[in-house]
Amino acid sequence: MFETSKWIWHKNLTGENITCNFRTCFQAQAGTEGRLAVSAQHFFRVFVNGVEVGGLSSPAPSVFTKRMRYLEYDISPFLQKGENVLAFTVLYLGGEGQNRTRGIPCLIFDCALTSNGHTSHFGSDESCRCRAQTGYAQNLPLREPRRLTGSTRFDPSLEEKGWKLPGFSDSHWEKAVISPANLLQLPLMRQE
């Protein structure tokens, strides 16, 4: 798992309390089973064909310089024949706070698809599309001295309609870039 995946991010998005949307499309046959493993610095939400399958405050806080935790999801019930979409919203808090250390904004995922007894993998890389303009206001102050929680302000009118669904054209989105986190070769541990 994660053998070909890379830590990715948006080329121009920096600072504290920032959010980035990512998406990637893939094809599946009828009856395909899928497993998805995901980690991010600091938190993520993940959607399959528009259905939220995990996130909000995932994964558990990690000591960035020593290891990162990842979560696994069975995405089989959400797959359809033909085009499918994995979509992510990633929140990078930045700085240091209670239960977390300074990190680098990044996302990594590995998707295993099994059909007719054959398993194939694909993961995060430069082919993923990303967008720094999300429904969340960027760079709002952190809310308390422990720097645990970022202030949020969400405006749904700023979210592009249908970006989490098949058929959406992301040609105006930017290609993801390899995050400097990739150089650290962080050990990934499955979160129980």
Image (spheres, grey):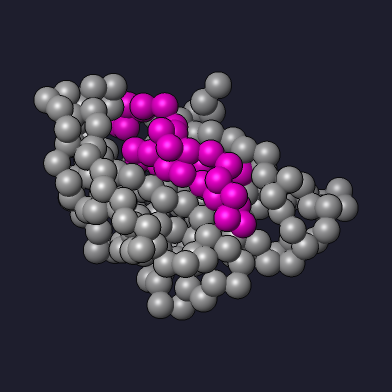
Q: Nearer the viewer, residue 165 or 95?
A: 165
At 52% across and 66% down in the image, what residue appears?
A: 162
Q: Is residue 61 one of those drawn in magenta?
A: yes
Total count of labels:
0
Q: Position of residue 52 (x, y in %)?
A: 55, 45
Q: Nearer the viewer, residue 169 or 137?
A: 137
In the image, taking residue 65 as reference, residue 21 lies left or right, namely right
Q: Is residue 9 one of those drawn in magenta?
A: no
At 73% across and 45% down in the image, what residue appears?
A: 77
Q: Which residues are magenta?
A: 36-65
Q: Which quadrant holds the N terminus?
A: top right
Q: Nearer the viewer, residue 5 or 10?
A: 10
At 55% across and 50% down in the image, what residue appears?
A: 47
In the image, taking residue 183 as reference, residue 55 lies left or right, namely right
Image height of 171 relative to 73, above or below: below
Image height of 85 relative to 172, above or below: above
Q: Quadrant of residue 165?
A: bottom right
Image height of 25 relative to 34, above or below: below
Q: Quadrant of residue 9?
A: bottom left
At 77% across and 62% down in the image, what residue appears?
A: 81
Most extreme residue toward the left is 145
Q: Nearer the viewer, residue 6 or 59?
A: 59
Q: Quadrant of residue 142?
A: top left
